[in-house]
Image (cartoon, helix red, strand yellow):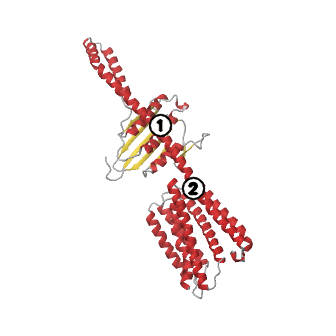
Amino acid sequence: MRALIYCLFMLPILVNAPMEVYFIDSVLKYKFKNRKLAYIIAAVISVVASVVAVVTCLDEDGKPRFTLNYDIVTMILALSVLVLMLANMKEKWWKKLIVFFLSDIMLQSFYEIFTASREIIYMSLPIETRVQKAVILLLLDILMTLLEIGIFVLIDKIRSKHDDTPLPIRYLLAFSFIVELFEAVFVIQTSEYSTEYGAMDFSRLDPTQKTMLVFTLLAGLLAVIILFYVRATKKERDTLRELNSVNEELVASQTRYYEATVKADSEIRAIRHDMKNNIQVLKILLGNKEYEQMGEYLSEMTEKLQSTEISAHTGDVIADAIISAKRTEAEEHGITLTTSGVISGISITPQDMCKMLANLLDNAIEATSDERLRDLDPAYRKIVLELKKTDKFFLISVTNPCAEKVKIVDGMVKTSKEDSRNHGFGLKNIRSAVENYNGELTISCEERPYGYEFRSDIVFLIPRNSPS
C-alpha cells in the first residue's frame, strides 16, 4: 500500500522535466544542440527530485504529503530545465526565457486538465477498499500521463511532417492563451463545487455535469491540436510558395545565362572567322605606320571580345547563372557588379544558392539604384561580390553603397518604408537558407567618404576533409 502511495506521489515529478524537454524540443521545435544529453540530464534530475521530494515530505506516519517542500522541489526542477535550456540551446537568451515560461504555463494547464479528468473518472467509479483506491488512482495517473504524452507526440508528428521549424513567439502566446482560456472555462464550471481548500469535489457532480466537463476538456485539447495543424499546414503552404518563387527565379536565371552563353559562343565564332581579315588589316596599318588607327581598331576588337565574356566563373553553374542575370539587371540601372573568387569547400543546393545569392544581389541592386545615388561617382556606384575560402571558413560577401544610414536591430534591417512588413523578407529567406548549413549571416552599415556602405557577410564552417 505504501509503495503505491509513493508511486502516486513521485509520478508527477518523474515525468516533469523529460516531458518539458520533449515539449520544448519536439512540439515547439526549439531544439537542443545535444538532444540526447538534454533528455538524459532531464531524466536524472527528475529521478533525484522525486527521491528528494519523498524524503523531505514525509509526515509523522511516514506518508508523503504535499507540503511547502514539495513546491520547492518542483520549483528547483523547473529552474534546472531553464538552466539546461540556457546552456544547450542555440537561441537568444530572451527568447529562451519566453519559451520556457510560456511552455511551463501551458504544461501546468495541461497537468491541471488531465488531473481534473482523472478525478472525474475516479469519482464516477464504485470503489470499496483503500488498496483499490490507490491502485485505480495510480492506473488513472499513468493513463492520463500516457494520454498527455500521446497528444504531444501527435502534435510533434504533425509539425515534423509539415513544419519542422521553431514555433514563432506570437503563435506560442496565442496557444498558451487558448489553453489558459479552456482551463478558465473549466474552473468557472466547477467553481460552485470547490472545497474550502480550493480543491474540486467532483463527487457532488451529476452525470450530466461530468459529461459537460469532459466535453469541455476534450474540446480544449482538440482545439489545440487543430490550431497546431492549421499553423503547420500554413507554414508548409508558405514554404511551397516560396520554393516555387525560388525555382522560378532559378529557372529564369539559368535561361538567361544559357542564352548569354549561346550568344557569346556565336560571337566568338564570328570573331574567330574574321580573325584572318583582322590580322590583315592590322598588318596594313602597321606597315603604313598608322599607329593611331591601329590603336582604335584594337580597342574596337577588345570591346567586342569583352562583350562576349560570360560574366562569372565561380565554379558553380547556378551561381554563375544568378550572377549573370543580376549583372544584366544591374547594368540596366547603370550599376557595375564585380565578382572575385570561386565557390569551394561547401556544397549548396540550387534552391538555397538562389535564396542566398539572388536575394543578396537583389537587395544590393535595390539600394544602389536609389534616386539619391544617381549622381554618385561611377567608381563608387558599384556592387562588389567576393567569394573567399580559408582552411576553416567559406565567405560570401556583398558590399554596396546606400543613400542613408541603415538601422540594424537584432541582425535585421529596421526600415521606415510603408511596406515594412514585406521589406527585409529577403534577409529572412537568406538567413533561413544559411541556417541549413550551420552558417551565419551578419549585416552592417558604415559611413564612407561618399556616403554609406552596406555589407552582408555569410560565413560557413567548412567540414573536415572537404575538397579544396
Q: Is residue 154 left or right of residue 186?
A: left
In the rendered image, the vertical position of residue 276 relative to residue 309, given as above or below? above
Q: Secondary structure at mark 1?
A: strand
Residue 377 lies, in percent from the top left, at 47, 29
Three-letter amino acid code at the position of disc 2:
Tyr
CA distance separating discs 1 and 2: 42 Å
Report whether residue 163 is seen: no
Q: Residue at x 60, y 56 (%)?
A: 227
Instruction: State which quarter of the image contains the N terminus.
Output: bottom right
Q: Residue at x 34, y 23 (%)?
A: 302
Instruction: Compare residues 249 and 40 and report the one nearer the observer.
Output: 249
Q: State if disc 2 and disc 1 touch (CB < 8 Å).
A: no
Residue 394 lies, in percent from the top left, at 38, 47
Q: Residue at x 44, y 65 (%)?
A: 36
Q: Is residue 307 left or right of residue 107?
A: left
Q: Residue furthest right?
A: 192
Q: Categorize mark 1 by other alpha carbons within 10 Å: few (<14), some (14-19), many (20+).
A: many
Instruction: Compare residues 345 and 151 and report the one nearer the observer.
Output: 151
Q: Residue furthest top?
A: 288
Q: Residue at x 40, y 39 (%)?
A: 318
Q: Nearer the viewer, mark 1 or mark 2?
A: 2
Three-letter amino acid code at the position of disc 1:
Asn
On residue 91, which mark appears? none
Which residue, given by chain and number where applicable, does mark 2 sit on? 229
Which residue, given by chain and number where applicable, does mark 1 sit on? 400
Compare marks 1 and 2 and give the one earlier in the sequence: 2
Residue 270 lies, in percent from the top left, at 33, 22
In the rendered image, the vertical position of residue 202 relative to residue 365, given as above or below? below
Q: Is residue 59 left or right of residue 427?
A: right
Instruction: Compare residues 8 and 439 and report the one nearer the observer.
Output: 8
